[in-house]
Image (spheres, rainbow, N blue to C red):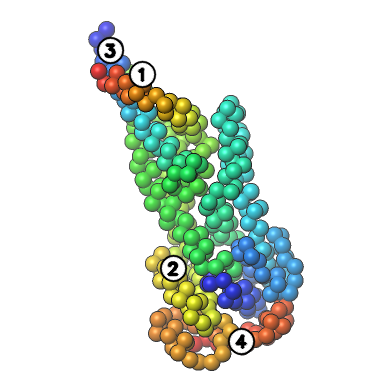
């Protein structure tokens, strides 16, 4: 679920979660938006541990700081084992500052998003940050792939040179296993698998949420083509706080003629809080085209 | 004697090229730690556990940054 900030991503996430669990599916609703509101909408406290909200429905508000710490700890542990004699390089000091490095939180959130593909639930609804940060997160594997292609090319040449040097020294052909090259190639395979998962409509799709106002719709018009450029399926456009059929809806129908449009009526805050109220809201959602 | 000399020459030349390429690779991967535009940090994190030689090489190069003439003569000497 993505869209401009405050348009109703969490509202639709909760509606979809409950609708799918009512249909008999095992559902996990997860928020990776640092400004969590899933608990507010469900009307209950939800933390970083999965909480059972109803039959076949669990929810979690992922803690970004904890995800970053967990993401980095994988490497610090390995570093500690392999670099016993390298304290002089002050590697641990680099890791202390690395958690604040630009992009680390995005990568940790992306890593968490990819871990959801290994879950058993039939449906996982992800409430994301606003569209800008979400697009940045979703773009990660494509950026990684471009860099990995170039780095593997360069590293292959380095490995070839090292082999040539050792072979001349030894006076015979020497084969060297370049650990870094192997790791880069392995990473590229994983990145390609991530891209396959993100571009498989049966495994991953996005609902783009908006309100019938100028700025959120402009944001939507930038967001949807960007997703389609990456071949990420846009399963529907959601218009929250919908009042009446007007030029806005016509505009969306013309701009996205093949995409279902879900209309959520304008309701009071009281009507949007709590599982029982959200269940009543499901019947009020209309689908056009 | 002459075959040993040619062997030394070819290794020196290869080692000079190897050193420069390793430096380039290290800067590409770890440049983000010092503010250079670089690949996503995930790539650096992934190879960091296996990059002791690269990091020592990078730190060594940084220490010799004020003696680039010395570095240049090293390379020229290898090619004589």
Which numbered mark, 1 or 2, is in the foreground of this view? 2
* Image coords of residue A196 (percent x, y): 44, 60
The answer to whether marks 1 and 2 mark residues whose Cβ atoms lie closer than 8 Å is no
Looking at marks 4 and 1 on the same chain, the residue that comes earlier in the sequence is marked by 1
Query: Which of A116/A143 is in front?
Result: A143
Q: Which residue is mark 3?
A: B5
Q: Please determine if labels 4 and 3 lie on a single subunit.
A: no
Which numbered mark, 2 or 4, is in the foreground of this view? 4
Q: Which residue is mark 1?
A: A170
Q: Which residue is mark 4?
A: A266
| Residue at x 50% of width, y 92% of height | A245
Q: Please determine if labels 1 and 3 lie on a single subunit.
A: no
Q: How many callouts does the rendering have?
A: 4
Q: Which residue is mark 2?
A: A227
Mark 3 burial class by Cα count in 10 Å: few <14, some 14-19, many 20+: few
Secondary structure beneath dot 4 equals: loop
């Amino acid at each position: 679920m993505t869209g401009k900030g405050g348009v109703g991503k969490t509202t639709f996430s909760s509606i979809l979660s409950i609708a799918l669990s009512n249909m008999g599916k095992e559902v996990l609703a997860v928020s990776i938006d640092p400004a969590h509101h899933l608990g507010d909408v469900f009307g209950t406290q939800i933390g970083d541990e999965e909480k059972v909200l109803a039959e076949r429905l669990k929810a979690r508000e992922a803690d970004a700081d904890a995800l970053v710490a967990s993401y980095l700890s994988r490497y610090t542990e390995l570093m500690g084992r392999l670099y016993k004699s390298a304290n002089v390089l002050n590697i641990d000091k680099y890791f202390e500052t690395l958690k604040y490095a630009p992009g680390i939180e995005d990568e940790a959130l992306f890593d968490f998003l990819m871990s959801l593909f290994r879950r058993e639930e039939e449906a996982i609804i992800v409430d994301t940050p606003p569209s800008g940060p979400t697009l940045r997160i979703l773009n990660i594997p494509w950026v990684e792939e471009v860099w990995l292609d170039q780095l593997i090319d360069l590293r292959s040449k380095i490995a070839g040179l090292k082999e040539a040097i050792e072979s001349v020294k030894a006076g015979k052909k020497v084969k060297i296993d370049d650990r870094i090259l192997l790791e880069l190639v392995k990473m590229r395979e994983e990145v390609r698998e991530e891209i396959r998962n993100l571009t498989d409509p049966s495994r991953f799709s996005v609902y783009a949420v908006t309100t019938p106002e100028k700025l959120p719709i402009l944001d939507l018009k930038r967001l949807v083509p960007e997703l389609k450029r990456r071949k990420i399926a846009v399963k529907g456009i959601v218009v929250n706080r919908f009042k009446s059929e007007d030029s806005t809806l016509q505009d969306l129908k013309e701009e996205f003629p093949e995409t279902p449009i879900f209309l959520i009526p304008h309701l009071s805050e009281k009507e949007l809080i709590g599982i029982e109220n959200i269940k009543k809201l499901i019947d009020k959602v209309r689908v056009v085209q | 004697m002459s075959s040993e000399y040619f062997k030394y020459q070819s290794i020196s030349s290869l080692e000079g090229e190897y050193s420069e390429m390793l430096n380039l690779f290290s800067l590409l991967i770890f440049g983000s730690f010092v503010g250079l535009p670089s690949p996503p940090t995930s790539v650096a994190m992934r190879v960091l556990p296996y990059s002791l030689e690269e990091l020592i090489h990078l730190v060594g190069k940084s220490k010799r940054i004020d003696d680039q003439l010395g570095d240049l003569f090293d390379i020229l000497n290898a090619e004589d």
